Image: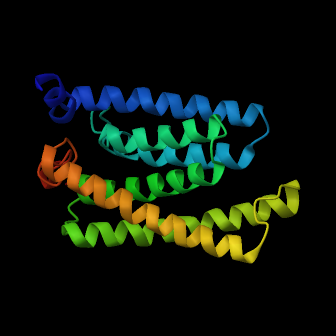
């Protein structure tokens, strides 16, 4: 249990794990570019870009989102890489991106959110990200000859499913942060209001 506490409570350990996971995501994006999967590479690089905003903004490599949030993005990349279920990979990647935004706002800025509001906001952010993902898929289908959007019915089900995934992921992470007191949780913000000023 002491080892787990180090993973959840030590800023340097959290940051080191998060940076390793970000490296894996970057490698996945490069691999996707090499195989011609430009859209997935773009989504993965967007997850990486959002994840590295806190350390770049504060100019401290240890100010990082909790590594389990980045691990969710790695799980999405693994699902995509192994070709298990590409739609599920997309749902996870979109939910990861939305969750990163919510976690960064909640834990790294003076913004305070109640538990229910954070879960609802993550679900709404997931819907917003999914909207942009749909636009990107449409553009890819039109200009790159892909076939991401096959029917309106499938598109509507994608929106319903990604919303469900977003709510479930946000609720699970909120429960996790409440129980562990992880670095970057509301109880242990990575940036205090004094640091932000």
Q: Residue furthest front?
A: 84
Q: Position of residue 176 (x, y in %)?
A: 22, 49
Q: Nearer the viewer, residue 80 or 108?
A: 80
Residue 174 in sight in this render: yes
Q: Is residue 22 left or right of residue 122?
A: right
Compared with 24, 75 (above or below) is: below
At a point 58% along the width and 44% down the height, the residue shown is 44
Compared with 122, 77 (above or below) is: above
Residue 196 in sight in this render: no
Q: Position of residue 50 (x, y in %)?
A: 46, 49
Image quadrant where residue 135 sits: bottom right
Q: Quadrant of the N terminus?
A: top left
At a point 45% along the width and 67% down the height, the residue shown is 164
Q: Nearer the viewer, residue 122 or 60?
A: 122
Q: Quadrant of the C terminus?
A: bottom left
Q: Position of residue 72 (x, y in %)?
A: 43, 43
Q: Is residue 47 left or right of residue 13?
A: right
Q: Nearer the viewer, residue 174 or 36?
A: 174
Image quadrant where residue 14 sits: top left
Q: Residue furthest top?
A: 3
Q: Is residue 187 left or right of residue 68?
A: left
At a point 15% along the width and 55% down the height, the residue shown is 193
Count of labels shown? 0
Q: How is the image coloured?
A: rainbow
């Amino acid at each position: 249990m002491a080892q787990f506490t180090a993973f959840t409570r030590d800023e340097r350990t959290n940051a080191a794990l998060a940076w390793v996971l970000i490296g894996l995501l970057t490698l996945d994006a490069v691999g996707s570019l090499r195989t011609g999967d430009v859209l997935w590479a773009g989504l993965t690089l967007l997850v990486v870009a959002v994840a590295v905003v806190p350390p770049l903004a504060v100019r401290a490599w240890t100010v990082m989102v909790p590594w389990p949030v980045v691990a969710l993005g790695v799980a999405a990349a693994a699902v995509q890489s192994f070709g298990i279920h590409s739609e599920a990979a997309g749902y996870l990647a979109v939910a990861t991106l939305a969750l990163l935004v919510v976690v960064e706002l909640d834990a790294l800025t003076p913004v305070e959110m109640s538990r229910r509001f954070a879960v609802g906001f993550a679900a709404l952010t997931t819907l917003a990200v999914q909207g942009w993902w749909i636009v990107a898929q449409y553009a890819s289908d039109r200009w790159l000859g892909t076939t991401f959007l096959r029917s309106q019915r499938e598109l509507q089900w994608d929106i319903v499913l990604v919303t469900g995934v977003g709510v479930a992921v946000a609720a699970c992470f909120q429960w996790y942060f409440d129980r562990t007191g992880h670095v970057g949780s509301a109880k242990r913000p990575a940036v205090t209001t004094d640091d932000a000023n």
